[in-house]
Amino acid sequence: MKILLLANYLTDSIQSMDKFASVMATGLTDLGHQVRVIRPQALIGQIKRSPTGLGKWLGYIDKYILFPSQLRRELAWADVVHICDHANAVYTTYLKNFPHVVTCHDLLAIRSALGEIPENPTSWTGKQLQWMILKGLNQAQHIVCVSEQTRNDLIRLSKAKSEQISRIYMGLNYPYQTMDEQAAKTCLTALGIAQSVPFILHVGNNSWYKNRLGVLKIFNYLIQENRHPELYLVMAGQPFTQEMQQFININHLQEKVIELINITNEDLCALYSLATALLFPSLQEGFGWPIIEAQACGCPVFTSGLPPMNEVGGEAAIYINPHQPQAAAEIIAKFLPKLSSMKTKSWENAQRFTQAQMLDLYIQVYQQVINQ
């Protein structure tokens, strides 16, 4: 099969979507399919490479005015087109008579534009873009959602019929597994973390729904009111926001919170392998990759008792209310002495999300749309 994967404009720097496209390209190629990855090129956008400000507007020229002609040229080669990120669903208008699939990771931006998420207001221009994306989803031949929660949102908000929508869980984007203890300790030493330090881990960027300030609040209650001063907090992802740094300073957590920026997959594997637990109190998610990454390494997970986190974590995670940091800290303190029993359950749950299974299901969808 000749599969054309449509990936994101690199200047937008959406790492999770870039990883997904890379995993699909490598995995499908390994299975013997012919794969080409295309994406809008930074031509006009070279003047100022930035996902914000002037750079964003120049990028729109590359994406929405220049790229469609490149897409049309590539269609002569392909059997099927897979738009790897629903944010690029605007291109379905050029694929009306060509087999194609769109992966929908979440409806958070569209829901925000519709006023469903008041804590994430959307500008007028942002609303127009989300309207274009929703229109593109309405025109799609077939849409794959990464969770039941995302599928339910799509059915509710779009004109797509239920038979046009599948649910395929994400597979791991890296071979996460429990790392040899000494090798993991060596990685942590290189990151500046003492080998004997017990720590709670959080992995995520600074998007509003990741609730990173909430992570700090939960940890603060945990070490102060629940008397676990031995614990540290490692936060892997983007640099702290001003609000987060202010909270750390006010509550004198400078010596207890460790900031790690843009770490490697190997280092992340080491962190998962040695962490006391992962704390992932997201307010919203499309899927929640860190949950299964941690579980694949045998790391117990505390996460929000909301879909899709509870859908992904299954019976192997411990659930908290992300809006109640004090109560969440009490639950964590209660389960800390029992976490060793969670390791096997965690690993077993992660086996539901294999890359091989994900690829097999996508191939079935490709064949379906080709046959249609």
Image: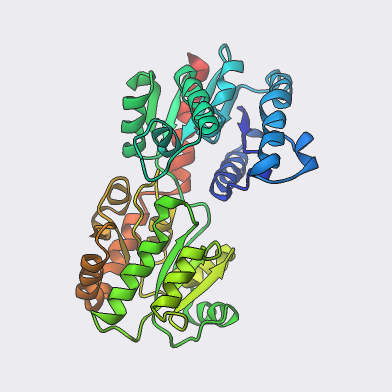
189 or 230: nearer the eye? 230
Q: Residue 29 occupies which quadrant of the picture?
A: top right
Relative to 368, say whether 303 is above or below.
Answer: below
328 or 192: nearer the eye? 328
Residue sitting farthest toward the top = 97
Rendered-image quadrant of the N terminus: top right
**Residue 174 appears in the picture as rendered:** yes
**Residue 274 appears in the picture as rendered:** no
Q: Is residue 105 left or right of residue 340?
A: right
297 or 193: nearer the eye? 193
Relative to 206, say whether 12 is above or below.
Answer: above
Spot occupied by residue 342 in the image (x, y as percentages of width and height) = 27, 68
Spot occupied by residue 237 in the image (x, y as percentages of width and height) = 52, 62
> In this figure, which colouring scheme has been used for the structure?
rainbow
Relative to 6, say whether 170 is above or below.
Answer: below
Q: Residue 357 occupies which quadrant of the picture?
A: top left
Looking at the image, which residue is at 27% across and 59% down?
316
Spot occupied by residue 21 in the image (x, y as percentages of width and height) = 58, 41
Spot occupied by residue 352 in the image (x, y as percentages of width and height) = 35, 49
Q: Is residue 30 left or right of residue 326?
A: right
Looking at the image, which residue is at 23% across and 75% down?
333
Count the numbered circles shown: 0
Q: Is residue 106 left or right of residue 339?
A: right
Looking at the image, which residue is at 70% across and 18% down?
76
